[in-house]
Image (cartoon, grey):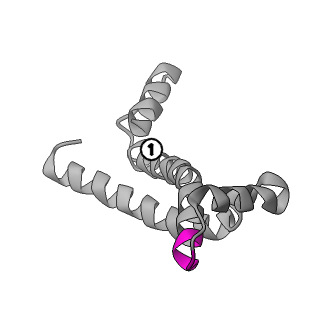
Amino acid sequence: VVTKVFYGWLRRAGFAVSSWTIQAGVPVGAALLASIISTVASQPGDMLLSLVNAHEGDKRTNDFIREIMATNNGRGFFIGLKTRFLHLGIIVTLQLLVYEFIKRLCGIA
């Protein structure tokens, strides 16, 4: 979806979409943006899952949510986001790039 949007913007702006730099740059930019979005969207759930799995006892999920919200002025769900960007962002970006270039090799792009 992001790749289609990028190509649409470039066509409307009058760029030659057939140039090698655009055909290589658009998938990289789209993969980076998609990895950022997926990293931010999945961070709260993974933060909660990590705390729930690390704790033994009779605490409920709502108790964990309240604890997370109370830490770092309500931004507790996003603690460790920079590290997650480094780890997950690289993985997702590379996966999407490999997927895009395999599609091109197969003539699907």
**Which residue is denoted by mark 1 in the rendering?**
26
Name the quadrant of the C terminus: top left
Q: Is residue 69 left or right of residue 18?
A: right
Q: In the image, what residue type sits under mark 1?
A: Val
Residue 15 visible: no
**Is 75 left or right of 82, judged from the image as shown?**
right
Q: Residue at x 71, y 64 (%)?
A: 79
Bin the neighbour count of mark 1 within 10 Å (Cα to Cα): few under 14, some 14-19, many 20 and up: some
Q: Can residue 11 be seen by looking at this rendering?
A: yes
Asked whether 104 or 72 is in front, the reply is 72
The residue range painted magenta reads 51-57
Please provide percent x and percent y for residue 27.
Answer: 41, 48
Above or below, 67 against 107 in this view is: below
Q: Which residue lies furthest to the top in this view?
A: 12
| Residue 5, quarter of the rendered image | top left
Residue at the limit of the structure toward the front, as seen here: 58
Q: Residue at the right extreme? A: 73
Left or right of residue 16: residue 41: right
> Is 88 positioned to the left or the right of 109 in the image?
right
Q: In which quarter of the image is residue 97?
A: bottom left
